[in-house]
Amino acid sequence: MEYMICSRCIMDTSDAEIIFDDQGVCNHCLRYDVLKDTRTIPRENAAKEMKLLIDKIKRRGKGKEYDCIVGVSGGVDSTYVAYLAKINGLKPLAVHLDNGWNSDLATKNIHKVLKKMDIDLVTHVIDWNEFKDLQKSFLDASVPDGEIPTEHAIDAILWKTAGKYNIKFILSGMNFATESLSVPAWAYGHSDWKYIKAVHKKFRNSSLSSYPHFGFMYLFYINFVKNVRIASLLNYIDYDKSETIKLLERELDWVSYGGKHYESIYTRFYQGYVLPEKFNIDKRRGHLSDLVNSEQITRTEALLEIEEPALSKNMLRDDKKFVIKKLDYTEKSFEKMLSSKNRTFREYPNSYSFVQFLRRLVNMLRKFDLYPK
Ligand SMILES: [Zn+2]
């Protein structure tokens, strides 16, 4: 395929499924324009809408020990969501997935900030042998979806904790202005149990019985019978990340990691090494494109930033050694995996069409204010 880059953002043909219009604008920019109204709130209405949401959460959680769940990773976004919940008088329960890859700093940050804010924490420690097999099966499947086992398990423990404690809201740290881009060719499957199961089955014959998971029936039950809702709190405010980092450092003694999603060693290595080396995917490109579309940086600034190396050579070398050992690869078998032919989720059983249908459904509900932003 001939190299092309979008004339508005910096997405390019490293997304194998990208499409450009006559003006050279990509499908991600066009999608951004379509979704903008359903996912963002005009500045003049933001405070009012935020208050409505907070009041609703309080009302539905009246008399209960907790009225909302915050999934925490130790990163900026989720820490700030916990902070916002607290200062707005909510009663959050923090939930954390320990998948074995936390950096020490992340674990320290989580405990420190939650203690400061007096927020209870439930940590789900995953069965390492099961999880290791699942992570390896995604690497061996040669698909760029290696973070899906973690993302699916996080969603599963959030939904299930909400069900268990009868909590009606899950506050998400996702925010449309800086991470709206969805590129199926770069990562797919966080709510597709059929796909996850199929990849595991093809490459391992171990058990997955304690791995936190959910199917569509459970999703329907928790959303429409238990009426649990996800609210992306950061969509209700003017979110300025660098100001937020300063605030967290000042108020909560939170310590910065020096990079997006670096709280997990696997994520850091996967995004900084496996994706670029094996799949020619640089996730920063999507993130920077979001910042261009939400007018936080210019396209020229984004183009300059993407030229910078994502990780230092020393950090990469150490991480690589660590990951190979922890996953029980040998250098040779790891290199073999890296050089095997790349594939996509479409070559394995999956529920892609149904997932797309569900996403459209939720966005339609948002349009009529029947689902939080
Ligand atoms: Zn674009």
Image (cartoon, helix red, strand yellow):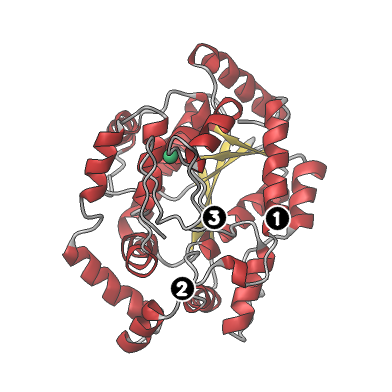
Which is more N-terminal, label 2 or label 1? 2
Residue appearing at x 44%, y 50% in the figure: 73
Mark 2, other Cα within 10 Å: few <14 / some 14–19 / many ≥20: some
Label 1 sits on residue: 353
- Disc 3 is placed on an element classified as loop
Q: Earlier in the sequence, mark 3 or mark 2?
A: 3
CA gap between label 1 and label 3 equals: 12 Å
- State yes or no: discs 1 and 3 in contact (Cβ < 8 Å): no
User: Can residue 210 be seen?
Assistant: no
Question: In terms of image quadrants, where is residue 319?
Answer: bottom left
Residue 127: quadrant of the picture: bottom right
In space, the residues marked 3 and 2 are separated at their CA atoms by 15 Å
Where residue 103 appears, as percent x and y from the top left, is: 34, 60
Looking at the rendered structure, the number of numbered marks drawn on it comes to: 3
- The percent position of residue 363, horizontal first and vertical second, equals 67, 36
Q: Position of residue 211 (x, y in %)?
A: 61, 69
Res. 184 mark: 3
Q: Is 136 left, or right, of 230 in this rendering?
A: left
Q: Most extreme residue toward the top, as rendered? A: 44
Q: Could you tell me which secondary element the residue under label 1 belongs to?
A: helix
Which secondary structure lies at badge 2? Answer: loop
The one of 167 and 304 positioned closer to us in this rendering:
304
Q: Is residue 365 left or right of residue 96?
A: right
Q: Quadrant of residue 226?
A: top right
Number of residues whose C-alpha sits closer than 10 Å to that of mark 3, classed few (under 14), some (14–19) or many (20 or more): some
